[in-house]
Amino acid sequence: MNLSDEQVLAMAPDESSRKSGKDLANPAKWVSKGVGDNALWGECQGSGSKPYQTQIDTGNMAFKCSCPSRKFPCKHGLGLLLLYSRQTTLFTEQTPPPWVSEWLAKRAEREEKKAVQASTPEKQPDTAAQAKRQQARQQKVSDGTAELLRWIKDLVRNGIMDLPEKDPSFFENMIRRMVDAQSPGLAAMMRELADISYFHEGWQTVFMNQLLRIYLVIQGYQHLSQLPENLQQDIRSSVGFSQSQEELKEQTGISDTWQVLGKQTSEEDRLVVERYWLHGIHSKRNALILQFFVRGQSTIANPLAPGTTIQAELVYYPSAAPLRAIIKQQMTVPSDHTFNGFTGWEEVVAEQTAISAVWPVYNDQVYTIATLTPIWHQEQWWLQDSQQQLMPVKKGFAHIWKLLALSGGAPLHMAVTGRETQYEPIGVWHEQEYKIL
Amino acid sequence: MERWNHIINTALLGTAKKPADAQGLSGPLRQAADTILGNASLDREEQFLHLAAVTYNYRQSGTQPVTAAVPPMTVCTPETKACCPPAAIRVLQPVLETDSIQLLQLWLEYCTKANLLLPPAQLPVMLDKAWRNKSLRVLTAAAGGHRAAWLGQFNPDWNFSRVADTPEERWLNGATAQRVEALKEIRTTDPVIALQWLQQTWPKESATVKTELLGVLEEIPATTDLEWLESLLSEKSKQVKETVMRILKKLPGSSLHEQYWQVLAGAIQLQYDGHVVVALPELNDDPVFQSGIEKLSNNKQVSDETHILCQLISLVHPSRWETHFGRSAAEIMTMFLQQEPLKPFAPALVQAIAWFGDQERAVTFMQQSETFYIDILPMLPPVQQQELSEKFFDEYPEAIIKYAGNHPAEWSVALCTKILRYAATQPYTYNQLFMNNVIRQIPVAIAASLDDIVPSESYHVGYWNNIKVHLGKLLQAKSQLPGAFKKAEGRKAKSPRLQNKTNNYQLTSKAPKS
């Protein structure tokens, strides 16, 4: 395990944990610290009389701490990992104390139990009641989508010219209606519509793009039975029907060595969404792992470290263009910096054409593209491929200077996220190593 | 794009005013439009939404990259020096976290002394730091190598990052901080050339730059600059004039210095019996007052006459008294310390020694005096400075801390202990920021005794503990610096070819499955 500062800090659930973690990467704060084959541990002197016991399962990158924080990883976990990455030699203890070995043993036991549970048949659910509940929900959703369609048609009939002057309640009422109609997916899509900046030039196109995406989902839902099975799943998940993760985990996934290309975090109404972009070295497939938590209460026990590599079995959510996946099981392995990817933008857009043919409401994708050069042209930054073709860098991209510094005007293999004509670099292969931006 | 604009126009006006139509559509879109618009079961709005959705997907499916003749970007010149070792980068992270510019400066000094470069990924952060702190600019430019200079082409804030190898090049093409450094360098080896450089570019410089460049002359005043400096008294800028005046006051041969001395020579006379008489002549509209000498005393205990004389004595070179009284330096000091009429002027004499940076007379003065004058401290040899600072710390704690903080030499452990003990009594003044600004002077060895330093007031304990933790971090980073760069010794510079090597990569012409 050899993580850089950036990789450790990228695991932090929020900015305050990142800051506190940095403060705790100080040997003076740690009463004891040690490292074993699969674990890292330390006792941190907090404000209480007894030091906090912090432990990290380095094999699965799992954290545990006796502090009262509900964040995962907590500041102590981050601080300990950061200290280890900076001053490995300080970790002189090699035999795990009982509180560490007990935890590791419990984890192993739990994994075994899970495996046993997976092999034993579960209690049969009450299918009649389940069908009744399902039917009731479908009715609610149908009513909701019909109302949303009426709202869209009214909007289109009267024109969107005066939207910038509309009261926020214009959107809020319909968002609430979608929540009532048990269609959280549509509510989220409506929220994006409400969040458009109506005072920026070109809002009309942004608005129409999103409105038509919503319209396509409604149309899809109203004609669900006529659609192929996988597309039905895309429509259902866009409306807001969730897919049981337990069911997914029962399926056989794709075992591969996955590069964690990057992490993007967004927040909406205190709900933090973490997007981890993965690339399978052997399967050459990309995947998106989504994690959700309420701000300040991250409960993700196994955060992924961007820039690292994991050996994992991933199960994709059923979709016409599968991208979102869950990790069935994972293990951190030494970083593999192999590059696989497209040769240029032509291949990227061809891939997007193939996706939009089967699922027109697709979201941002991740691409690994060879030899891209950042170029300043027409007052904005672009990424130029080896065929001299350009795609614009997303406006407001925060790491453009780091990207330029690494490039020095020379082409770099790059991992980018985006779709159509907006791309955001998330990492580059520089001097034979993958580096996150 | 035209098709999409047509959709937007219809959406803006509303289908009640402008129903959907197939205007401007051709090929498969036209076919789809005909089917949609011909479907009588769809109302106007649905016809529009259907057509718009098809156009939307047609557009996104047919997205193409832009093909444009963009002039190729200049590629950064390959570096000839090696990058810092990972150990040095690991130390840089905590150094950046402490927000101590002094510690960062120290890191950069180690880096440039080892002839190493900052890794590219760290450049934006470091260039931004240097943009905010002028003191880091020259070092960052040196440690940034060609890549920092290359980045400077795209970000005007970083234009100081231009690498220049010779002082001439730095003087001609560098940013102000680099020009100041180049002028300083030349000034120490060839003051005449330095003056010529200044004279050549003087009319083109702005008032701010002129002031910064004059600062170099002020650091090492030379009589060869006299004539030119006196000609600058007619400069328009008040800022420039004040700086020129200050430098002239430091040059014993200047006309201003002569004016001061003429007044003093007339006012302080040695009688045949060895006694001194002090009598200031009438100076109503004397030109000395135009140079900043105050007429009135702001202290009731000090007469206006004494106040004027004190100011003049502090600005006249002490050697003048030796020729005036025909005595040695030591005798002059004794006269000022012992003769009643001269006693009030002893502090002014000390100020004059400090003003002219006269180290020899400073030592002589301290040999004669039983009183400690803080102003003289910087003029003394380093060992004596530390001894006196320790000895008189309890009498002048704040003045000594102020001086010791501005002096680059590392404090002795004994002095540092005294300073920190005092700081613990006033943690709101000597806070984390103070520690950031004096970490260069704080010896690493003090870390072992930090826990013994406790504030006298219990309500200061919490705040002081935070400062102590912060200081601990600073000291830890400082202690790691020599080792982190030592490991780099003997490493050969990486070949630029190696840096661009991509032989491990596999390119797949076939799109990966998604």
Image (cartoon, rainbow, N blue to C red):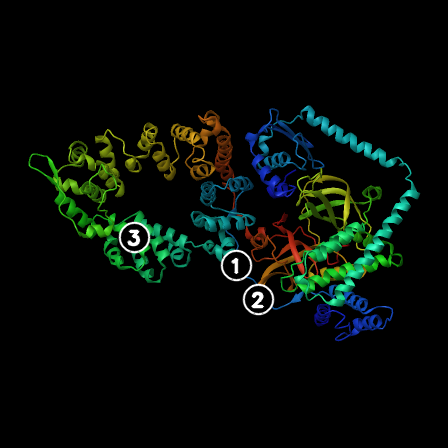
Q: Residues within 10 Å of mark 3 (few under 14, many from 20)?
A: some
Q: Is residue A75 left or right of residue B405?
A: right
Q: Quadrant of residue B205?
A: bottom left
Q: Secondary structure at mark 1?
A: loop
Q: Nearer the viewer, mark 3 or mark 2?
A: 3
* Nearer the observer, B433 or A115: B433
Residue assigned mark 2: B71
Mark 2 vs mark 1: which is more N-terminal? 2
Which badge, 3 or 2, is on the more N-terminal residue? Answer: 2
Nearer the observer: mark 2 or 1; the answer is 1
Disc 3 on helix, strand or loop? Answer: helix
Residue A365 can be seen in this image: no
Label 2 is placed on what type of residue?
Pro
Judge by depth and name the residue closer to the eye, B502 or A206: A206
Please provide percent x and percent y for residue A223.
87, 59
- Which circle's residue, 1 or 3, is located before the other in the chain? 1
> Of the numbered discs in the image, which one, if any, rests on residue B154?
1
Tag 1, which chain? B
**Residue B11 in sight here:** yes
Q: Would you identify the image quadrant in which residue B109 lies? A: top left
Picture coordinates of residue B357 (x, y %)? 27, 42
Q: At numbered mark 2, what does the secondary structure look like: helix, strand or loop? A: loop
Tag 3, which chain?
B
Q: Which residue is mark 3?
A: B242
Categorize mark 1 by other alpha carbons within 10 Å: few (<14), some (14-19), many (20+). few
In the picture, the disc for residue B335 is: none
Residue at horizontal 53 percent and vertical 39 percent from the top: B94
Mark 3 and mark 2 on one chain: yes
Q: Tell me the kind of residue under disc 1.
A: Phe
Work out how far the residue at label 3 is from the one at label 2, CA to CA, in angstroms: 50 Å
In this view, which residue lies farthest toward the right? A128
